[in-house]
Amino acid sequence: MIIIDGSQSINKLAVKPNEQLEVLLLLKKACAITCSIILEVDSSVKFYSAILGGNVQCEVNINHVGAGSTSEHTGIFFGTKHDQFKLNYWNNHTAQHTSGKINIHGVLFDSAYCDFKGNIKIQQTALDTKASLDEHTLLLGDKARSDAVPQLDIHTNAVQASHSSGITKLDDEILYYCASRGLTPETAKQLIVRGWLAECITSPEVQNLVDKQLGYVEA
Amino acid sequence: MSTIPQTTRQTTDKIFAGLNRDTFDHKNQSSYTKHASRGVSEELVRKISTLKHEPAWMLQKRLDGLKLFFEKPLPKFGPDLSALNFDEIIFYASPDEKIPSKSWETVSPDIKKTFERLGIPEAEKKLLAGVGAQYESATVYHRLKERWEKLGVIFEDMDVAVQKYPDLVQKYFMTRCVPIQDHKFSALHAAVWSGGTFLYVPKGVKVDAPMQAYFRMNAQNMGQFEHTLIIIEAEAEAHYIEGCSAPKYNSNSLHVGCVEIFVGKNAHFRYSSVENWSRDTYNLNTKRALVGEAGRMEWVGGNMGSCVTMLYPCSILQGERAHAEHLGIAFAGAGQIQDTGAKVIHSAPNTTSSVIMKSLSKDGGKSVYRGLLTISPRATGSVSKIKCDALILDDHSISETIPDMNVHTSDATIGHEATVGQIGVEEVFYLMSRGLSEQEAHGMVVNGFIEPIVKALPLEYAVEMNRLIELEMEGSVG
């Protein structure tokens, strides 16, 4: 697995035909970073992103230029205090029979802010492409804010493309249920946040970092 | 082919019987445009105001609008409007009709025939509470059934309303809802507006039949700038329908209408429109509603024609528990860009909104959903759901979805989903196995796709919408 930690601002990766690649993008402090990945014929990438604090500008472009290439971008963002995230996640499909998934879950505490832009672009040449973009944010701070623009830009009809996006608060009913089971509001909140992010946390290292952050939030 | 049951068809045939391409493309003589000036100038703006015997404040508003129009740039988003030549457009031309008639018998035969072809007088008899008909820049017919007049409902041509109800008009006309400085085209509209509808429904009055206005452009290079001002007082209810069309000339026409709606406390208003401009019309409309406490605003819209449409009906939810619903269909055929969407601004607590948009692209057409959802810090407990689906009917058409969601409170729930796809081969195969031709099968799938929007229209207009979609779908297979 390749780990990108924000020490370099521009990161370019090419995945050769029939190869598979795993990438972990782990950002814990202020930085501006671009990751660009080119997928050749029948190659695939599993891209994990974890944005865990600071003033972060991050752009991830996954380009499906080879027929049959596939990508999965699974990520989280976790903002506290005055953290500001500007995230641009793009999947570009130019070849046939490609597939791409983006699935991002985020949590914003305190006055944290996230400006999320996602885009799936399917060119006229990318017949039989399947693409999806899902982005969901849980707002937990009184002054936490979120902007989201998940775009689809589709230039042919032989495709399946979808996106979904949600911005939501803690569900009172779930909190009530947890309280009825004897959990304190803090423990309940911690469990809910863990559950919210679980689908998109893909490595123990990221899980540990998230737990540490949650410890801070409770303190 | 049609998916409309035979029984429905029999009851509605009389209204929209002859609806085909000729209905919309038929043009009358337009000698009144021979001496009409082209382009927009202060001289023209003063002339319009003088012809209409307007009060000084309205002339000043027009002049302010003109100044802003010259100052403001074209929009920096959406379709390219640089080919639109304002100097070619006739901004004001009025047929010989002097004042809006209260009887179709006194409308000149040519114009009357045009509206008869479109089924307007017949629809008035059968189901409408009131009708307005505008031809070029002038309203030629306007009438409200007596029953509603007695209850204090006002349904007037906008020019007449300026004279008859100056205080009401001055209070609401391009002030709080769509200010003239909003954008370049709202400024242009303020400068050259002519005709349109003024609807006032007093407190507690529930108008149970829809009212309709139909806007028809006839001459080449015409511009139409009707203003619709609707005030629905507390506890009142009404439904208003707008239809629009123009013949085709192969040179640009321009439609820059403006719709302002005020929905009072606990009031309920539905605005439906079927816009079917010709393929050489730029349709750059502004529609906005301010919704008060527990008020309910519903937009139902179909955009078929025009070469470029930029239209984003907007609801500003100002009162607690206000609700907005946006339902829309856009159909983009060859050479068309349908850049449409919905804007909802939640600025009070516990407000709710729902947006459902459907788009179809065919023969290289481009349909865009451009949405804006803003939840202000005050709008705690607000809930919004947005769903947009696109159907692309061939491999060289384009669909774009650009929803912009800005949430400034942690106490809101927002959901957005969108899908893009094509007509399923299996669905078509199944329908063909039941004896339908391929074209009929495609038409049926498309009708099913748009059904959630169409069923929000009164039956007769649902028939019209289905028929328009059929016309657009002609020749789409094989």
Image (cartoon, coloured by chain):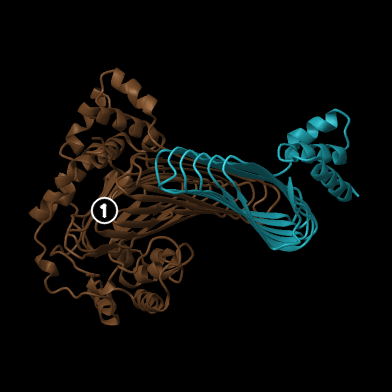
Count the marks: how many?
1
User: In the image, is residue A155 above or below residue B438?
Assistant: below
Does the rendering let one see residue B414?
A: no
At 74% from the left and 33% from the top, the residue drawn is: A173
Residue A8, given in percent of the width and then of the height, sits at 72, 62
Viewer-closest of B445 and B92: B445
Quarter in which the N terminus of chain B is drawn: top left
Quarter in which the C terminus of chain B is drawn: top left
Provide the letter of the chain coloured brown.
B
Residue A98, given in percent of the width and then of the height, sits at 51, 40
Residue A61, given in percent of the width and then of the height, sits at 59, 53
At 18% from the left and 56% from the top, the residue drawn is: B248
Provide the letter of the chain coloured cyan.
A
From the image, tell me which residue sits under label 1.
Answer: B277
At 33% from the left and 42% from the top, the residue drawn is: B210
User: In the image, is residue B346 above or below residue B394?
Assistant: below
**Three-letter amino acid code at the position of disc 1:** Trp
At 69% from the left and 63% from the top, the residue drawn is: A9
Viewer-closest of A67 and B393: A67
